[in-house]
Image (spheres, grey):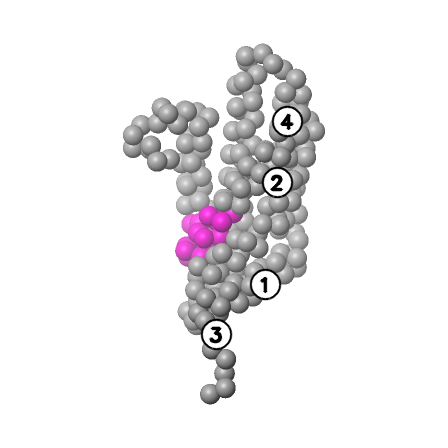
Amino acid sequence: NNETTVPSWGKSWFKFLALLQRSILDALKNPGILGLRILTYTPFTLFLGLLFYNLQDDENYESVNSRAALLFCSSSFYIFMVVAVLPFLAKERLICRKEVLNGCYHPITHHFAVSVGSIPNVVILSFIITLILVGMVKLHNPVQFFLILLLALWNAESYAILLSTCVTNYILGIIILAGIFGLAMPLEGFMLVPSMFPSLFAMA
């Protein structure tokens, strides 16, 4: 037998790269998915920019609530709108299920590959949102805002990708994901500071 033996971790790595390449190519072949999300996010971001225009110029006590409201709206809305990607993941779910049942790869490998493949889209969305809000609201630390929004959106996107492979149809996935994000909103620290959480939610 002249075949070269490849370690199991090596095979998983090659499968990850192949799935990552396929995920990126799918995104390039279907730019309408990202375009639709940009068309959804941009008007709302412009609305927030107009509503909180030049907020950082206000240094009175009342502006503290306005700043908290801006951060809550920007984080909650953009994260919640990630549920919109579930219908587009329905086709990927069918392909993933078929290939996993045929032993082509482990579902965890697929999840990590598709999650990493979604980073360019998340970067573009976070950059557009940050660019608009920084210009209109005049945020003092745009880099920090961009990084936090990027990580939050990527985390939400990874949840959506994971859930899409676990449910039988995207409608059920939207309901479950909306419920998860809805439960997370009161735990963000804007409605109630973490130190005031009941002991049941201490780990939140």
Q: Could you tell me the amino acid type at mark 1? A: Arg
Q: Residues under labels 1 and 2: Cα distance? A: 23 Å
Relative image position of residue 26 (x, y in whole percent)? 61, 60
Q: Could you tell me the amino acid type at mark 2? A: Ser
Comparing 101 with 44, the one in front is 101
Query: Is 144 inside the magenta-drawn segment?
Result: no
Q: Residues within 10 Å of mark 1 (few under 14, many from 20)?
A: some
The answer to whether marks 3 and 1 mark residues whose Cβ atoms lie closer than 8 Å is no
* Residue 33: mark: none
Relative image position of residue 78 (x, y in whole percent)? 55, 38
Relative image position of residue 180 (x, y in whole percent)? 41, 41
Q: Nearer the viewer, mark 1 or mark 4?
A: 4
Q: Residues under labels 4 and 2: Cα distance? A: 14 Å
Assign a secondary structure to mark 4.
loop
Q: Nearer the viewer, mark 4 or mark 2?
A: 4
Q: Could you tell me the amino acid type at mark 4? A: Leu
Q: Does residue 177 appear anywhere in the picture? A: yes
Q: Residues under labels 3 and 1: Cα distance? A: 22 Å
The magenta-colored residue range is 157-173
**Residue assigned mark 4:** 139
**Label 3 vs 1, first from the N-terminus:** 3
**Label 1 vs 2, first from the N-terminus:** 1
**Label 2 vs 3, first from the N-terminus:** 3
**Residue assigned mark 1:** 22
Assign a secondary structure to mark 1.
helix
**Residue assigned mark 3:** 6
Q: Is residue 114 above or below residue 66?
A: below
Q: Is residue 156 above or below residue 14?
A: above
Residue at figure coordinates x 44%, y 51% from the top left: 163
Q: Does residue 40 appear anywhere in the picture? A: no
The answer to whether marks 1 and 2 mark residues whose Cβ atoms lie closer than 8 Å is no
